[in-house]
Image (spheres, grey):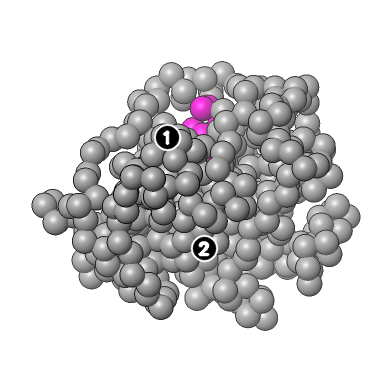
Amino acid sequence: MWSKVFKKGRKDIEQEEGDGDLRASGNKKDSSSGETTDEEQQLSNLTRSLRISEEIKYTDLTILQTLGTGTFGRVRLAKSKSQERYFALKQLKKTEVVRLKQVEHVNAERELLADVNHPYVVRLFCSYQDATSLYLLMEYVNGGELFYHLRKRGRFPLEWTQFYASEIVDAFGYLHSLDIIYRDLKPENLLLDSNGHIKITDFGFAKKVKPGDRTWTLCGTPEYLAPEVILRYGHGKAVDWWSLGILIFEMLAGYPPFVGQDPMEIYEEILAGKIGFPSHFESAAEDLIKKLLTADRSRRLGSSKRGVKDIKQHKFFKGVDWEDLHNRPHGPILPEVAHPGDTANFERYEEEPLIMGKTNVGSDPYEGMFDGF
């Protein structure tokens, strides 16, 4: 049943408060959560700023097939002519970005990805722009979406769920150490590499929020929104831990805990807070999910001064060697990949031509709006 409901994936939503751009109006202090913990600060101190790691000219790229489509454009497979390497080229059409008032989001996505360097986060190599589009050249992750593998199997066993959840916890702990809130966790935004490890992608809703501050935009996927986002109370890092609870439930059950025919019905279910656990759930999984899906964000697991450490030490993760996490050879699912540029794990799309480098003088009405690209 649920595989049919979510067969095509779920749409993100975004709604600003009032008629202004909330990012421009600044953040507000949140006394209940969001402080940078000691462990997060240590992670931050160990961070090597990636910035733009390589300068790869767009003229060196051969554009191949489409990997995915979205509101602003599409993601295509690209191959370097000189290096024999494959990349994912994300194209964003300027007209759509401006029309939907996403200029700051898109600029922020590039800036945040340039600063991030973590094994479970997709890597940005460089960016471009021409008169019509913006481009992000990123690591190509050829194992497909976790969403695809979850729907194919119906649900995951406990050990698989623990594996994927531990990599997300590690990545979120790192992002939070940089004061980055991800805000769009769902199986559709998790890719598997050829060894079966998680790669978080799509930072369109990610935002840097200072410790103790809150942000107010209603954004994300309805099934994954925390109560404070729906109620416009302002939100911080705790929303990522809520979404982790939703994801763990969905991996184990095959469907999310709160569903409905439309977003409003889903919001009502979330605010009611009643979770029906399937009989096959083990007690440790139920306990972790309940503590992550606590409506009071000040009491939500991961929101104390100990931060991510409280989550890592939960009994659900018993047996996980957090110090050796990055050395695990492979995940429970080894995607079928014939070569680095294999696209067998992605859907096929009707192609449309792409001509990069349209830079005629005076042809760009949005000149100056995307100076970082």
Element under label 2?
loop
Q: Residues within 10 Å of mark 1 (few under 14, many from 20)?
A: few
User: Which corner quadrant of the image does residue 4 belong to?
Assistant: bottom right
Report if residue 313 is visible in the image.
no
Element under label 1?
loop
200 in relation to 50, above or below: below
Of the residues under marks 1 and 2, which one precedes in the sequence? 2
Q: Which mark is residue 252?
A: none
Q: CA distance from mark 1 to mark 2?
A: 23 Å
Q: Which residue is mark 1?
A: 371
Residue drawn at point x = 31 percent, y = 42 percent: 125
Q: Give amino acid for label 1.
A: Asp
What x and y, as percent, mark residue 50? 34, 31
- Horizontal relation, residue 140 to residue 85: left or right: right
Residue drawn at point x = 66 percent, y = 76 percent: 5
Q: Residue 290 lies in magenta, yes or no?
A: no
Residue drawn at point x = 56 percent, y = 28 percent: 179
Q: Which of the pair 341/59 is nearer the observer?
A: 59
Q: Residue furthest left?
A: 82
Q: Magenta residues? A: 171-178
Residue drawn at point x = 32 percent, y = 48 percent: 359
Q: Give amino acid for label 2.
A: Gly
Q: Which residue is mark 2?
A: 70
Q: Which of the pair 297/138 is nearer the observer?
A: 138
212 in relation to 117, above or below: above
Q: Residues within 10 Å of mark 2 (few under 14, many from 20)?
A: few
Q: Which of the pair 184/32 is nearer the observer?
A: 184
What x and y, as percent, mark residue 253? 65, 67
What x and y, as percent, mark residue 81? 14, 56
Report if residue 206 is visible in the image.
yes
